[in-house]
């Protein structure tokens, strides 16, 4: 199947730590199907993992009654689009310290968002207190897969 | 690859903690912190973390590396991270943590750096 014809995929995960590896595997396999090779699959998987863990830990607070919604799609022209949505309380994006600022380099946490943003080409966070959080990110394929009739 | 941790002490008293597998949010990070804390409390303040067999780290692991480095520094010692792969180095550079960790290409180079301290 050509990368351009890979169907979108939607999945929902329980808010437990055990979901992280399983969800990341789904994303890495999908990235492979839309034409990414290593190490891109690795970095896409890692970016997703960071956002998924944020949804699990900060969004849903490991609350078993809440789910994490994931949507994957192939991007026209070659690439992957990933959406992660939690059912949490949302947050104020401007309140998140920049982990790459000199004064924050020795902090023990707070790097997940920055890591994911740095690993992807496009990155959008939609969140507000009371509305949950949705992260949409995408990475373009360096070379568009060539479709053939064979 | 499952996580494994092996510890040894060199004749010089330098501690080497060799890690293998994935270093991500979970019990393995706690184990690593305990190992470093135990080493420092036992008087071993020069420590090398051999990461040559670690293929995958997430942001939680990066935070623990920073924390372990800080533990050694606060105890008047030094912790060096040796042998990180290119992929892991990409993550450390992305987060600018490469500017606060002491990174060495090999365990031997890290030991040499600690021996000269």
Image (spheres, coloured by chain):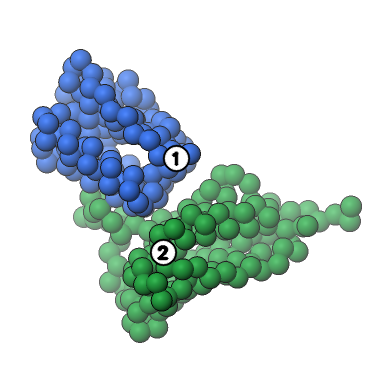
Chain colours: A green, B blue
Name the element at disc 1: loop
Percent coordinates x, y for residue B29 in the rendering: 31, 46
Name the element at disc 2: loop
Percent coordinates x, y for residue B18 in the rendering: 34, 30
Image vertical order of residue A65 relative to residue B92, above or below: below
Point out the image quarter for the N terminus of chain A.
Answer: bottom right
In this view, the residue farthest toward the right is A150
| Crowdedness near tag 2: few (<14), some (14–19) or many (≥20) residues, C-alpha within 10 Å | some
Q: Tell me the residue at 60%/66% (across/down).
A: A72
In this view, the residue farthest toward the front is A64
Q: CA distance from mark 2 to mark 1?
A: 20 Å
**Residue indicated by mark 2:** A16
Q: In the rendered structure, the residue with mark 2 lies on which chain?
A: A
Percent coordinates x, y for residue B34 in the rendering: 22, 42
**Residue indicated by mark 1:** B2
In this view, the residue farthest toward the bottom is A130
Residue B117: quadrant of the picture: top left
- On screen, residue A36 versus residue B114, left or right, reads right
The verdict on a common chain for dots 2 and 1 is no
Residue B89 visible in the picture: no
Q: Tell me the residue at 23%/22% (across/down).
A: B9
* Near-viewer residue (B92 or A68): A68
| Crowdedness near tag 1: few (<14), some (14–19) or many (≥20) residues, C-alpha within 10 Å | few
Residue A104 visible in the picture: yes
Label 2–label 1 contact, CB within 8 A: no
Q: Tell me the residue at 23%/46% (across/down).
A: B67
Percent coordinates x, y for residue A8 in the rendering: 66, 68
Residue B72's disc is none
Residue B4: quadrant of the picture: top left
Q: In the rendered structure, the residue with mark 1 lies on which chain?
A: B
Image vertical order of residue B46 relative to residue A82, above or below: above
């Amino acid at each position: 199947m050509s990368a351009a014809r890979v169907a979108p995929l939607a999945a929902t995960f329980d808010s437990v730590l055990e979901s992280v590896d399983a969800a990341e595997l789904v994303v890495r396999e999908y990235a492979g199907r839309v034409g990414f090779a290593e190490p891109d699959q690795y970095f896409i998987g890692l970016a997703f993992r960071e956002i998924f863990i944020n949804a699990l830990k900060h969004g849903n607070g490991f609350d078993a009654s809440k789910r994490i919604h994931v949507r994957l799609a192939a991007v026209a022209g070659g690439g992957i689009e990933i959406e992660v949505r939690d059912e949490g309380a949302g947050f104020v994006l401007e309140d998140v310290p920049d982990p790459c600022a000199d004064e924050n380099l020795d902090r023990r946490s707070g790097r997940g968002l920055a890591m994911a943003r740095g690993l992807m080409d496009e990155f959008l966070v939609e969140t507000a207190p009371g509305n949950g959080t949705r992260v949409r990110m995408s990475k373009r394929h360096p070379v568009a897969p060539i479709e053939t009739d064979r | 690859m499952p996580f494994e941790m092996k510890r040894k002490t060199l004749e010089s008293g330098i501690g080497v903690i060799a890690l293998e597998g994935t270093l991500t949010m979970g019990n393995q990070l706690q184990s690593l912190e305990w190992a470093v804390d135990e080493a420092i409390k036992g008087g071993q303040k020069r420590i090398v973390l051999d990461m040559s067999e670690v293929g995958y780290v997430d942001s939680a692991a990066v935070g623990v590396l920073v924390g372990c480095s800080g533990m050694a520094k606060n105890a008047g010692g030094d912790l060096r991270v040796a042998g990180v792969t290119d992929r892991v180095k990409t993550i450390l550079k992305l987060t600018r943590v490469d500017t606060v960790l002491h990174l060495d290409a090999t365990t031997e180079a890290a030991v040499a750096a600690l021996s000269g301290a």
